[in-house]
Amino acid sequence: MFASMLAAGFGTLGYLMIAILVVVIFLVSRIRIVPQAKVYIVERLGAFHGEWGTGPHFLVPFLDKVARIVSIKEQVVDFKPQPVITKDNVTMQIDTVVFFQITDAKQYTYGIEHPMAAIENLTATTLRNIIGELELDATLTSRDVINTKITALLDQATDPWGIKVNRVELKNILPPREIQDAMEKQMKAERERREKILQAEGEKKSQILVAEGEKESKILKAEAEKQSEILKAEAEKQALILRADAVREQKVLEATGEAQAIEMVQKALADSIVKLNQAAPNDQVIKLKSLEAFAKAADGKATKLIIPSEIQGLAGMAGSLKEIIKEQ
């Protein structure tokens, strides 16, 4: 009997332990760990209960449930090309890229159904409104303006949905085929025109450089000739100066020699006079000496001689003596 009671006790305890284990496992399974950059929207009995941020949370059994898991990271969505019509009635295809971020998980969850479809349709209608105010050329050259306008309008429109539109980019702008062909022809013509302009500019610069080179060459040649003439004139000047100096030196030397010769003659004459005075010669000796000097002068190249009267008398006396000697 005791054994049966012990067996019954162990059976009840086992069942209790099993029940406790099941409850613990069930409760542990209700723990939710929210990762980084995620927000859990929790509903209790079908109504919004709260937003769970990063970390562990307990989900009350049978009462709470996670209605939506929302990512708060910036997201990128690429929408398919949309047909738009410009102000000048040109139909083109434009596809856009939208960068957005969810800032309010509750509004994003309960504010609108299918938010991505709503953003796509809103982007298309906003783009049509903006492009409809622009002509084709302005559309092709005003990407930044269009991006700024559509970003501001989308951000304002999606704010009640808990969505922040950071920027919108026009990915491709595709005009009709015939317009593309016309644009290609225009671009080709523009490239050819620029090429011709560049070639003309190159030829112009080349001619200018050649002319400048010739000008510089002529200037350098003229400068060289000028310097050559200057050097030649300077050389001739120096030669004339040197010749004049040589002539002057020669004349100085000749004058000095003549002066020295005259001085020597004068000295010799003075010495002769002194000696004559010392010898006390008579008039006949002096006349004879004068006659000798006259004879020496006659040996020169002079064509005119002035004979002193004393010598003339002496010559006459000599002629008389000669006649007497002949008579005898």
Image: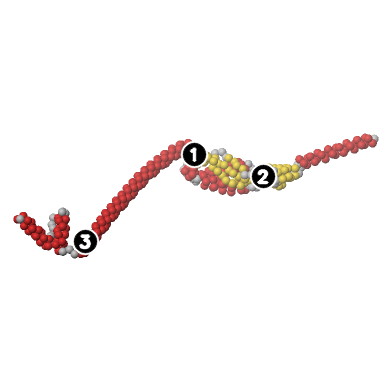
Mark nearest the camera among 3 and 2 is 3
**At which x and y percent is residue 301?**
16, 54
Crowding at label 2, few (<14), some or many (≥20) Cα neighbours within 10 Å? few
Q: Choose between 240 and 269: the one closer to the eye.
A: 269
Which label's residue is closer to the chain start, 3 or 2? Answer: 2
Estimate the x, y position of residue 315 in percent, counting from the top left.
10, 59
* Mark 1 Cα shell of 10 Å, populated few (<14), some (14-19), many (≥20): many
Mark on residue 175?
A: 1
Earlier along the polypeptide chain: callout 2 or callout 1? 2
Q: How crowded is mark 3: few (under 14 residues within 10 Å), some or many (20 or more)?
A: few
Residue beneath label 3, please? 272
How is the structure coloured here? secondary structure
Q: How much space separates mark 1 and mark 3, taking CA atoms?
A: 138 Å
Asked which secondary structure carries label 1, the reply is loop
Camera-near label (2 vs 1) is: 2
Q: Mark 2 points at which residue?
A: 37
Residue at position x 86%, y 37% in the image: 14
Q: Which residue is drawn at 16% across and 59% down?
A: 289
The picture places residue 179, in percent across and down from the top left corner, at: 46, 38
